[in-house]
Amino acid sequence: MTTGWKIAGADLAGWLSRAEQVIHLNPDGTAPRLNSVPQGNLRVGVDLGTAYTVLVVLDEAGNPLAGEYQFAQVVRDGLVVDYWGAVNLLRSLKERTEERIGRQLTRAASGFPPGVPRAEVRATANVIEAAGMLCPNLVEEPSAANQVLGIHNGVIVDVGGGTTGVAIIEDGQVVYTADEATGGTHFSLVIAGAIGLSFEQAEELKKDSREQARLFPLVRPVMEKVGTIIERHLHGARPESITLVGGTALFPGMAGVIEEVTGIPTRIPDRPMFITPLGIALADTGD
């Protein structure tokens, strides 16, 4: 894995830290605002995830400017299941972001998991266009993630809310992709069933750092399943590393379980939840 990768004059860790700062709300619940209206083309990425919808804005050079994200189950396993819910949510994220940066967003790139039917990929673009932006660019999510990570040889695994996407990288190019249903939503379902909670309560409990050690034995089998999915799609290959992205990768112990199952060194970059949305924005050519 490339560790000294540079973008917009900053190291990867610093760039991701800046991105997180402009996406997260301030401690008082307000959104960070820019000191001046950005000039030049904007690069916008929209990630319609199973658990979270994320919108991020970069300037022409790739510097993070603003972003919004919100929990919503408008997509399932890469497929839009609540079209108008997705449109209304994205329109709200767009309007809040426009207020922060003082400019309208007129276009955005978006992503899709490997193996999603082309008609469903088009549905993603339709959501973006119904929310008031053109969507001329759709990129496969593993390729988007590698726009940020710059891996030369290895495997990227995007563990999202509903699916696990596997991408094998050789000489900097994605040579194989696959996607299977298993992700953070399954963590929540297991927790809900074991403890007797609603799905929504389990979803919140899962994110509570004070509870995660107690919950680890419950969700470990799901982690192991993710590991077997990865191993199956490697077809006996032994890549030099596995890199986990997606919000589910944040659960403590995830990398260790995957490494134990596959026998391959496994790592999690900083801010894994935002890797793919940021890569989608980098894939946008600007308005």
Image (cartoon, rainbow, N blue to C red):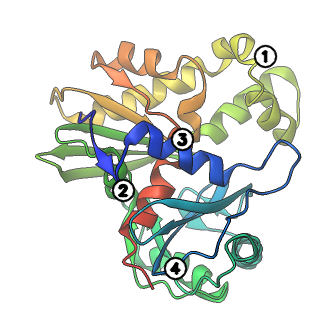
Foreground mark, 3 or 2, reads 2
Secondary structure under the numbered disc 1 in the rendered image = loop
Q: Which of the numbered marks, if any, corresponds to residue 39? A: 4
Q: CA distance from mark 1 to mark 4?
A: 43 Å
Is label 4 in contact with label 3 (beta carbons under 8 Å)?
no
- Position above or below: 166 against 215: below
Foreground mark, 1 or 3, reads 3
- Position above or below: 141 against 172: below
Is label 4 in contact with label 2 (beta carbons under 8 Å)?
no
Foreground mark, 4 or 3, reads 4
Foreground mark, 1 or 2, reads 2
* Nearer to us in this view, 147 or 222: 147
N-term mark: 1 or 4: 4
Q: Residue 213: x, y in percent?
A: 69, 11
Which residue lies under the disc numbered 1? Answer: 210
Foreground mark, 1 or 4, reads 4
Q: Residue 15: x, y in percent?
A: 46, 46
Q: CA distance from mark 1 to mark 3?
A: 23 Å
Which residue lies under the disc numbered 2? Answer: 8
N-term mark: 4 or 3: 3
**Can you see residue 103?**
yes
The amino acid type, in three-letter code, at marker 1 is Arg
Q: Residue 127: x, y in percent?
A: 61, 80
The amino acid type, in three-letter code, at marker 3 is Ser
The amino acid type, in three-letter code, at marker 2 is Ala
Which residue lies under the disc numbered 3? Answer: 17
Q: Quadrant of residue 260?
A: top left
* Nearer to us in this view, 168 or 120: 168
Q: CA distance from mark 4 to mark 3?
A: 22 Å
